[in-house]
Image (cartoon, grey):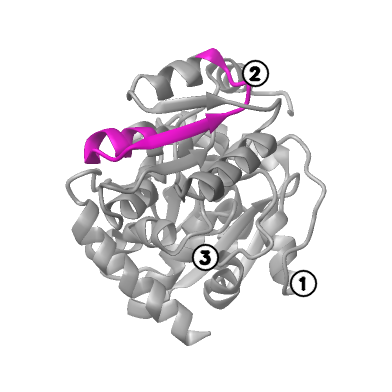
Amino acid sequence: MIGIVLEAAARSVQARRRICGYIYETPLLPSRQIGREIGSSVFFKAENFQLTGSFKIRGAASKMTSLGNDREVITASSGNHGIASAQAAALIGQALTVVLPETVAQAKLDRIRSFNVNVILHGVESGLAELHAQEQAASRGLVYVSPYNDPEIVAGQGTIGLELLEQLETIDNVFIAMGGGGLIGGIGAVLKSFSPGTRIYGVAAQNSAALAVSMKAGRVVETEHHDTLADGVAGGMDEDSITLPLAVSVVDEVVTCTEAEIVGALRDLAFKENQIVEGAAALALAGFLKVAERCRGQRNVVVLCGANFDHDKIFSLLNDRGREP
């Protein structure tokens, strides 16, 4: 497994050179209050300040800059990946089609269309839109861009790890929310290659934990999915996902969090750190808080993966501090 880790890290080094003009190098912010309360050094890698409000543009830009401009790209996502792909295509000058479900929220549809990419509405849910995008790619000779199951996507996300190594001399622990595995696989490969003593914690949402369950089984497992505040990490995995063996190789421990724990972390970020983020970002902090006693006196990084949240949902949770979700 060492080979796939080193290869992924090398791809991230190459990707960083290609995408540096299309992304922000996000800050690493020291905790205002949480670290002091726990007795640890805590830093937040603020991808919530990234262009498009999410780390996803790193992977999208990495994939698109690895192709010639004569190749048309197609993807499917009404969330962070779709928005990031549309903006990356606009910046790079890549021809892009985004397939969205017919039920997509108007605000998301308008935002993706604002980048002047081709939009196809198909199906009543995201899975059908994704299948249609894959079928279009096969029949029309387009390049399909997966949100996570692609070496260049993983490489782009891994550039976060390269920035961390420059921003902090020693990192004992890193906490990363787990979805399809592109983010944790990319960051983990870089850190294990250049800072092997750093411990990688993968944080899973109890209500949708496909990668965590699959890692335990050693193969992609179909799991039941329930609504989660960390909707950015919800959903299943491709049968042939390249991120599973990578995650197995780089993740030292998986922490699974409940919805109540995610909400608690969301409120801590808002009221103690003055940061309002999406549920998937709060999930990473929830994982840290669950094992914080073991990390006392160490240097800990929590990756805040994004801040593209449903305003009504988030603000209702923040305004009702005493009530469980």
Q: Mark 1: which amino acid?
A: Ala
Q: Residue 316: where, in percent of width, then height?
A: 61, 16
Q: Residue 242: where, in percent of width, then height?
A: 56, 67
Residue 289 is covered by the magenta coloring: no
Q: What residue is drawn where x is 65% and y is 42%?
A: 131
Residue 229 occupies quadrant: top right
Residue 14 occupies quadrant: bottom left
Q: What residue is drawn where x is 47% and y is 33%?
A: 98
User: Is 253 situated left or right of 160 in this image?
Assistant: right
Q: Which of marks 2 and 1 is nearer the N terminus?
A: 1
User: Foreground: 177 or 236?
Assistant: 236
Compared with 69, 2 (above or below) is below
- For the residues labelled 2 and 3, the Cα–Cα distance comes to 30 Å
User: Foreground: 218 or 68?
Assistant: 68
- For the residues labelled 3 and 1, the Cα–Cα distance comes to 27 Å
Q: Mark 2: which amino acid?
A: Asp
Q: What residue is drawn where x is 61% and y is 40%?
A: 130
Marks 1 and 3: in contact by CB < 8 Å? no
Compared with 227, 59 (above or below) is below
The residue beneath circle 2 is: 320
The residue beneath circle 1 is: 217
Which image quadrant: the C terminus? Answer: top right
Q: Residue 312: where, in percent of width, then height?
A: 58, 15
The residue beneath circle 3 is: 295
Q: What stretch is highlighted in magenta?
A: 86-106
**Crowd class of label 3 (few under 14; some 14 to 19; many from 20; radius 10 Å):** some
